[in-house]
Amino acid sequence: MSQNAKIVMDAVRAADHDRYLTALYAPDDKRDALFSLYAFNAEIAGIRDRIHEALPGEVRLQWWRDVIAAGGEAGAGHPTAEALNVTIATFGLPKPAFENMLDARIFDLYDDPMPSRTDLEGYCGETAAALIQLAAMVLDPVGAPRFADLAGRAGCAQAMTGLLLLLPLHRRRGQCFVPADILAAAGSSPEEFIAGDGGPGAKRVVAAMMALAREHLSAFEQGAPTLPVSLRPAFLPLALSRAYLGKMENGSPLEGVARLSALRRHWLLLRRASKGWPAL
């Protein structure tokens, strides 16, 4: 492994340990490409945490747009940018998917409420679902297009579970990813939900979000038994989603981040990597 590849791998291991573990189940000759995708995702997902003002954050997103559009040697000296451009060129990945991902991440930089469930699903589609589909294209470019719809369901389930896990962080910084129509149906509002204990409708809001995540997860699990072995590593993060949702049901997502033990995560990933998803 080159020094650059090791830097990228270590970045994923530090910033997104679950996806780091899933990449280890991919064939040796595909792992570096997956790590470059996951490192890029971690970079743009973490911009708000590193750059606390929106305008500089948008400048950073634009830097990534320019690097990806230029390709080749663009981004020289930045290990993740160099690795990502190699991956895009080697596997013929569609640059518009990365542009859409960057556009979606603009939402992260501001405190505007998510307008509707449709908008939330669109956000999940352009971020987590796109990442799954790009990983699938690396693993099996012939088979991947047949599972684009399944990647959409998987991405929504994974992203919504992740947003629930991050509720305490988002509420502390005044950010609300819960759609306004779900809040209204639960008798709440963005302002009320992010303040104090979340208000009297907070538990109903969380329950509605968990139900939505489970809806997409169930739809994914119905189609998952048809996934070929070649594509399993791209979808492996979903092996953890139901366990995270179960953990949150037994606790309070508003107060603390639900965690799975390292042993349980390894077991769930190993089971799905070796056996796939059972028919429902």
Image (cartoon, rainbow, N blue to C red):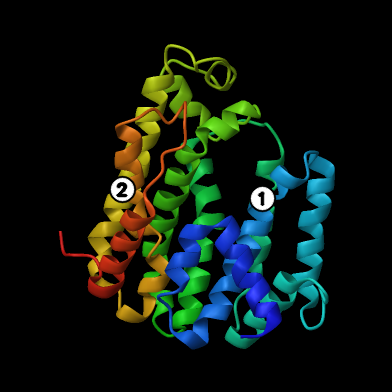
In the displayed structure image, the side of residue 19 where residue 149 appears, left or right:
left
Q: Secondary structure at mark 2?
A: helix
Of 271 and 156, the residue lying toward us: 271
182 is higher (above) or lower (below) than 16: above
Q: Which label was assigned to residue 185?
A: none
Of 34 and 148, the residue lying toward us: 34
The answer to whether residue 114 of the structure is visible from this angle is no
* Quarter that holds the N terminus: bottom right
Residue beneath label 2, please? 243
Q: Secondary structure at mark 1?
A: loop
Percent x, y of residue 186: 40, 20
Percent x, y of residue 165: 46, 40
Percent x, y of residue 59: 84, 52
In the displayed structure image, the side of residue 72 where residue 186 appears, left or right:
left
Percent x, y of residue 206: 40, 28
Q: Amino acid at mark 2?
A: Ala
Which class describes the residues within 10 Å of circle 2: few (<14), some (14-19), or many (20+)?
some
Residue visible at 70% across and 47% down in the picture: 106
Q: Residue furthest top?
A: 200
1 is higher (above) or lower (below) than 21: below
Looking at the image, do the residues carrying marks 2 and 1 touch, with CB atoms under 8 Å apart? Answer: no
Q: Residue furthest left?
A: 280
The answer to whether residue 99 of the structure is visible from this angle is yes
Q: Amino acid at mark 1?
A: Gly
Mark 2 and mark 1 lie on one chain; the one further toward the N terminus is 1
Quarter residue 40 falls in: bottom right
Residue visible at 51% across and 50% down in the picture: 124
Residue beneath label 1, please? 46
Residue visible at 36% across and 45% down in the picture: 244
* Quarter that holds the C terminus: bottom left
Mark 2 and mark 1: span between their CA atoms? Answer: 24 Å
